[in-house]
Image (spheres, helix red, strand yellow):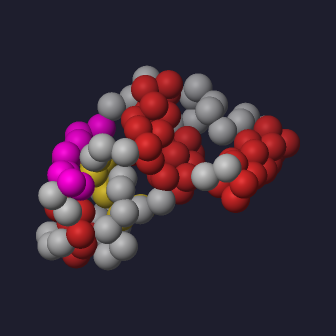
Amino acid sequence: MRLYNSLGPNPRCVRMFMAEKGMTLPTIELDILGAENRKEPYTDKNPGGQMPALELDNGSVLGETVAICEYLEDKHPTPAMVGATAEEKAETRMWQRRVELNIT
């Protein structure tokens, strides 16, 4: 796996999530001010051009912050950041969605 990283709040969220889990990944830095995320070869991997993106070992790419964090949580469940039980996970997802819809 490798993380496509840049300036901005969404990449920072993934970096903070990884830091809290005590994990590191190889990282490729993109210059979003120079629109590097809006042209090839990055858009060949992630057509939406959003940042960050996580390239999996099989070559597929996740381009949404929440999906990246949940994938990392599933692959590395300890320490639990999203929740250890179905109830905790549901509450985390509820609050994440509320923030997404009503704050950001």
Left or right, 90 with reference to 32: right
Residue at (15%, 73%) from the top-left corner?
A: 40
Residue 62 falls in which quadrant of the image? bottom left
Left or right, 101 with reference to 45: right
Residue 92 falls in which quadrant of the image? top right
Left or right, 74 with reference to 37: right
Magenta-colored stretch includes residue 27? yes
Residue at (30%, 38%) from the top-left corner?
A: 25
Place of residue 88 in the rendered image (x, y in percent of width and height, measured from the top left) = 79, 38
Place of residue 16 in the rendered image (x, y in percent of width and height, measured from the top left) = 45, 31
Q: Name the one closer to the observer, 12 or 91.
A: 12
> How many marks overall?
0
Q: Name the one closer to the observer, 88 or 48.
A: 48
Residue at (23%, 40%) from the top-left corner?
A: 26
Magenta-colored stretch includes residue 29? yes
Place of residue 59 in the rendered image (x, y in percent of width and height, measured from the top left) = 28, 65
The reply to whether residue 56 is in sight is: no
Q: Give the range drawn in magenta.
A: 25-33
Place of residue 83 in the rendered image (x, y in percent of width and height, measured from the top left) = 71, 36
Left or right, 92 with reference to 24: right
Residue at (20%, 63%) from the top-left corner?
A: 35
